[in-house]
Image: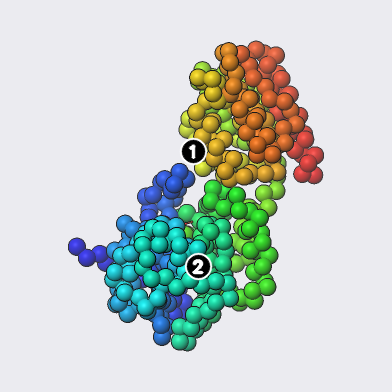
């Protein structure tokens, strides 16, 4: 059955022809609670151009949206801003339907796309290169590592649209194309989660890109990312939010995340959290049995204190915590005060491995790790309370 989908016009000569993945919940290990979109765009100029594609299962949807504007075989160029398969795995289907004259991508993009799909005939471009579309032109800027080595953005001068691929995006499927039609609290929540889980380790590159934006002299009308809604106004809000995420400044909040077997570590976590709260600092307790790693990372990114606790099992830190440590290490959180704790019966590797992970992440640990045997005593719990209060005071002094 042929699918019926319509394109949506975003400016005089540009159409959104992407796809909504309403029910995706696992995006390479990231819990996408509100689904996502794979945005692709069609420029109707003398040279008709498709910017990015979608995830392979949505190729028909994209081609149907294109067909609502123009026959796919009338497209002259494809520009691939980012080779990750959520934006490129429909490329072979698109190429088969379109038979484009040229496929523009970055130098690294040509290599990556070749590795995934074979040589479909790529024309590499770099920062400063332009492609004349007849009435307008597309200019390219390399944004290496935002998000992959191949990433670049494309500027279409005629309609003042910045096609920013992953940058300025978020995982959010919804009824509206424009960010200004959503509640800001939803956008902020999803941007912070997206940044923490996708871009946090490249924070310095994000800051460099944001610093370079004014120098590019772009009179931006629309920011059109590859995920989530588009920005036709309030550009300073999304740019400012990205900068705030990238700066990773400590906030007056504590995350206490724990795994527990027989409630000993949980009791320690609760006493520590109570100590934090006694100093007027906001605290959030998260049990790894019910809290996804990507939510832990988001909460960690918003907290000045990260207390992580786990039991020892089979002479190792409890597996749920090992997973979270591995994830946090990769995403390179910084500017935090750390506290490692746990419970054990005999060998006691759990809290030690958490403390070692903090050290590896260069996270300051003003209070020594604490581990109890089997169950905490009343004196142990008082000590956890005191440690929470002491760390809260240190955090407040740090951010004053
Ligand atoms: Fe949305 Fe890095 O791909």
In the visual, does 376 lie left or right of 259?
right
As drawn, is 40 to the left or to the right of 380? Answer: left
Quarter occupied by the N terminus: bottom left
User: Residue 148 or 112: which is nearer the viewer?
Assistant: 112
Q: Residue at x 41, y 82 (%)?
A: 47
| Residue 277 image-quadrant placement | top right
Q: Position of residue 71 (x, y in %)?
A: 29, 77
How many numbered discs sit on the rendered protein? 2
Image quarter for residue 308?
Answer: top right
- Between the residue at mark 1 and the residue at mark 2, the CA separation in whole angstroms equals 35 Å
Query: Residue 345 at x, y = what percent?
Result: 57, 13
Q: Position of residue 12 (x, y in %)?
A: 45, 80
* Farthest-out residue, left: 1
Give the residue at x 58% y 13%.
Answer: 346
Q: Nearer the viewer, residue 70 or 251?
A: 70
Identify the residue shown where x is 70% and y is 18%.
Answer: 382
Per the image, label 1 sits on a secondary structure element best described as loop
Q: Rate crowding at label 1 as few (under 14), some (14 to 19) or many (20 or more) other CA atoms within 10 Å.
A: some
Going by the image, does 200 lie left or right of 22? right
Q: Quarter-wise, where is residue 167 in the image?
A: bottom right
Tag of residue 292: 1
Q: Nearer the viewer, residue 29 or 145?
A: 145
Pointer 2 residue: 106
Q: Residues within 10 Å of mark 2 (few under 14, many from 20)?
A: many
Residue 169 seen anywhere in this rendered image of the structure? no
Mark 1 or 2, nearer chain start: 2
């Amino acid at each position: 059955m042929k699918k019926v989908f319509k394109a949506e016009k975003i400016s005089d000569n540009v159409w959104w022809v992407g796809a909504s993945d309403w029910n995706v919940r696992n995006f390479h290990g990231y819990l996408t609670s509100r689904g996502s979109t794979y945005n692709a765009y069609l420029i109707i100029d003398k040279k008709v151009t498709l910017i990015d594609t979608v995830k392979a299962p949505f190729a028909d949807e994209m081609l149907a949206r294109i067909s609502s504007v123009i026959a796919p075989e009338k497209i002259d160029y494809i520009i691939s801003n980012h080779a990750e398969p959520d934006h490129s795995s429909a490329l072979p289907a698109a190429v088969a339907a379109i038979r484009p004259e040229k496929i523009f991508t970055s130098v690294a993009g040509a290599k990556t796309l070749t590795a995934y799909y074979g040589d479909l005939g790529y024309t590499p471009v770099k920062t400063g290169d332009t492609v004349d579309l007849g009435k307008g032109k597309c200019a390219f800027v390399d944004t290496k590592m935002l998000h992959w080595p191949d990433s670049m953005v494309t500027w279409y001068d005629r309609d003042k649209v910045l096609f920013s691929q992953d940058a300025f995006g978020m995982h959010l499927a919804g009824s509206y194309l424009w960010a200004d039609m959503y509640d800001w609290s939803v956008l902020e929540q999803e941007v912070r989660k997206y940044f923490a889980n996708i871009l946090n380790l490249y924070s310095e590159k994000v800051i460099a890109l944001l610093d370079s934006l004014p120098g590019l002299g772009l009179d931006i009308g629309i920011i059109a990312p590859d995920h989530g809604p588009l920005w036709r106004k309030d550009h300073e809000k999304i740019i400012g939010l990205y900068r705030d995420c990238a700066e990773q400044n400590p906030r007056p909040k504590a995350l206490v995340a724990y795994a527990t077997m027989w409630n000993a570590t949980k009791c320690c976590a609760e006493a520590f959290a109570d100590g934090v709260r006694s100093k007027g600092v906001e605290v959030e307790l998260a049990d790894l049995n019910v809290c996804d790693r990507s939510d832990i990372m988001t909460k960690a990114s918003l907290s000045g204190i990260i207390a992580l606790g786990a039991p020892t099992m089979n002479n190792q830190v409890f597996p749920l915590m090992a997973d979270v440590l591995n994830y946090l290490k990769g995403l390179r959180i910084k500017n935090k005060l750390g506290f490692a704790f746990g419970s054990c019966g005999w060998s006691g590797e759990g809290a030690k491995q958490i403390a070692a992970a903090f050290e590896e992440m260069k996270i300051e640990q003003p209070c020594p790790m604490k581990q109890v045997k089997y169950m905490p005593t009343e004196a142990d719990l008082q000590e956890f309370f005191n440690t929470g209060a002491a760390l809260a005071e240190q955090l407040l002094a740090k951010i004053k």
